[in-house]
Amino acid sequence: MFTGIVEEIGTVLKYDELDTSESGGNGVSMVIQASKAVEDCHIGDSICVNGTCLTVTEFDKTSFKVGIAPETLDKTCLGLLRSGSKVNLERAMAVGSRFGGHYVQGHVDTTATIIKIQPDENSIWYTFKVKDEQLMQYIVRKGFIAIDGTSLTVCDVTYNTSQQDKDKEDDKEEISNTFSVMLIAHTQQNTIMSSKSVGDKVNIEVDMLGKYVASVVHSALDAPNSKLHEKIVDIVKQVSK
């Protein structure tokens, strides 16, 4: 478990597409240069790399190695990293420490593409188009979101537009299913976001609490002989009278 408070920016020293060493596991591996992340490191520790929970398989005083599974490569944009790439790093939460962000699992849900960057005094607006549009139901204004492992507040959300609106304006499809965040100067200086450009991809983890609530509600509504659906319909009818 993580908080989304990035501890340091690391540098990829090596990206190996087929690491046949014992610590490589005959798959993709990365060696990442770091300082804080290896201060109290152990084999098997979890470190969040650009929002992705990865397992340490080897380390020394200045770097650590992680393996990357095919499922992880499919769900994240870690496969775009190469030697020299900068990455956000956070160690797993320590018991008794301050909790300054939000609950982040390090289980990336999807990726998003930056479609707009707009400076606003000493801050910067970033607008993203989500790859998996079904996840937009969990992205709410003033809610939590983790972008490349950074805990941020959603400032604005644009959901699906109607087909009629799309017919009227050609650019509606481009701006639907998007969300925006604002980065203060401190976040710009201490994460990799400020190095991103329009068209770049980022890892997205939506608020886990929202996913759990939605799962419970859907299960209750879909359960055999459930009367919850009928009650909700009755309430909607009463309110709409």
Image (cartoon, helix red, strand yellow):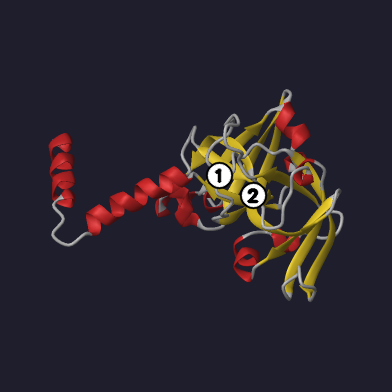
Circle number at residue 51: 2
Q: Nearer the viewer, residue 8 or 157?
A: 8
User: Which of disc 2 and disc 1 is earlier in sequence?
Assistant: 2
- Asked if residue 160 shows in the view, the reply is no
Circle number at residue 203: none
Q: Residues within 10 Å of mark 1 (few under 14, many from 20)?
A: many
Q: Is residue 123 left or right of residue 34?
A: left
Where disc 2 sits, the SS reads loop
- Residue 5: name its quadrant: top right
Q: Residue at x 68, y 44 (%)?
A: 91
- Asked if residue 3 shows in the view, the reply is yes
Q: Nearer the viewer, residue 116 or 210?
A: 210
Circle 1 sits on which residue? Answer: 104
In the image, residue 82 lies at what x, y percent?
A: 82, 60
In the image, residue 21 lies at what x, y percent?
A: 80, 73
Where disc 1 sits, the SS reads loop
In the image, residue 216 lies at what x, y percent?
A: 31, 51
> What amino acid type should be assigned to the residue bearing mark 2?
Gly
Q: Residue at x 54, y 55 (%)?
A: 109
Quadrant holding the C terminus: top left
Tell me whether the residue at label 1 lies in contact with that at label 2, contact meaning CB atoms closer than 8 angstroms: yes
> What amino acid type should be assigned to the residue bearing mark 1?
Val
